[in-house]
Amino acid sequence: MKIVYYEDDDTLFIEFQKGHIVRDESLSWNINIGYTKDGIGEITILEAQKNGLYPLQIEKVLGDVA
C-alpha cells in the first residue's frame, strides 16, 4: 500500500495494489476509484484537505478488547 499527498494540487492518492487499471469509476466529482482485474487498485481524491479527508486518521487495534 502506498499513500501520497500532493500538496500543490490538494490531491490524495492511495494505491492498494499495483496492476493495470481495467476500469475507472467516479463516486463523485472529486473521488475516483481505479480497479485492476483483482479488485481496487487505487483511489484518487481531489481537494482532499479542503473536504476534510486529509490528513488521514488511522487507528490501530492492539489485541483483543474485552
Image (cartoon, helix red, strand yellow):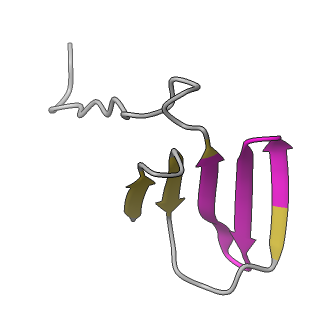
Camera-nearest residue between 1 and 63: 1
Relative height, residue 17 to residue 7 (above, below)? below
Quadrant in the rendering for residue 59: top left
Q: Which residue is located at x 71 percent, y 45 percent?
A: 31
Q: Which residue is located at x 58 percent, y 25 percent?
A: 51
Relative height, residue 24 to residue 19 (above, below)? above
Q: Which residue is located at x 50 percent, y 57 percent?
A: 14
Relative height, residue 62 to residue 33 (above, below)? above
Q: Position of residue 12 (x, y in %)?
A: 50, 50
Relative height, residue 17 to residue 4 (above, below)? below
> Which residue is situated farthest in the top direction here?
66
Q: Position of residue 56 (x, y in %)?
A: 37, 34
Residue 1 appears left or right of 37: left
Range drawn in magenta? 25-45
Q: Magenta span has 27?
A: yes
Camera-nearest residue between 2 and 63: 2
Q: Main secondary structure of the magenta part?
A: strand
Q: Which quarter of the rendered picture does the C terminus lie within?
A: top left
Q: Which quarter of the rendered picture does the N terminus lie within?
A: bottom left
Q: Position of residue 35 (x, y in %)?
A: 73, 68
